[in-house]
Image (cartoon, rainbow, N blue to C red):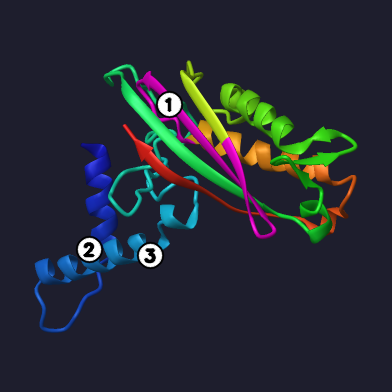
Amino acid sequence: FFSLFDQVNSLFSACTWLPGRSLVTCMSMTFMRHCFVSQLRRPSSKCGNVMNGYGQAPFATGAKGVGFTHLDMNTNKPTMVDVNPKIATFRTAKARAVVQVPDNVMSALLNGDVQTPKGPVFATAIIAGTLAVKRTAELIPFCHPLLIEKCDITINTVANDIVIDCFCGLNGKTGVEMEALTGATVAALTVYDMCKSIATPTSMLIHDVRLLQKTK
């Protein structure tokens, strides 16, 4: 009651008197002006502010009206998504990463693999990518630890590009796209590392890291 009284009293005190207008009209116009100014002063969640005008954490929404699921809507604290209510289904994802290499690296291509002083590049990259898939939850904080049932990494060459595709599948309550992206990326980094012995690091480029498909 006292809070409401204080607000009304504050509004009455701030009321702008206009000639020929009634008290109610003047108070209404003052109230509307107060609301407009408050809205302008309120931080926008789209600008990345932590707190909104009411001292509460904003729940920023995306294009489809779905909020950032890794942010608690009340505290704005990073959190892991609760997948307990979900039903386990077969989920798949396929991701790609491309490594652009100079001519001398491609000239070392032999029997479907690039041979370097460090060993066979593609075979090592596939092993590294598979290990990364299984340890994604240790690299990305709010990824759920998943029991990966299938991981298939393929490497092909197109001109001076080494194209790495990582396919993952499992029966679970959450998607496996982060595992596929991690596998493709780490495999690309491994190619980069393995080829440093025969190419200068600045002559290689990792690009086009993206999710190709996802099912759930």
Residue holding disc 3? 40
Residue type at the position of mark 2: Phe
Residue 116 showing in the rendered view: yes
Count residues near mark 1 (Cα–Cα under 10 Å), then give few for <14, some for 14-19, many for 20+: many
Magenta part of the chain: 154-177
Count residues near mark 2 (Cα–Cα under 10 Å), then give few for <14, some for 14-19, many for 20+: some
Q: Quadrant of the C terminus?
A: top left
Q: Residue at x 51, y 49 (%)?
A: 210
Q: Residue at x 69, y 41 (%)?
A: 112
Residue 71 showing in the rendered view: no
Count how many numbered circles sit on residues in the image.
3
Residue 43, image x and y in percent?
44, 56
Residue 169 - label: 1
Q: Which residue is nearer to you in this view: 164 or 179?
A: 164
Residue type at the position of mark 3: Leu
Residue holding disc 2? 31
| Secondary structure state at the residue bearing disc 3 | helix
Q: Is residue 81 left or right of residue 99?
A: left
Magenta span: chief secondary structure: strand
Which is more foreground, mark 2 or mark 1? 1
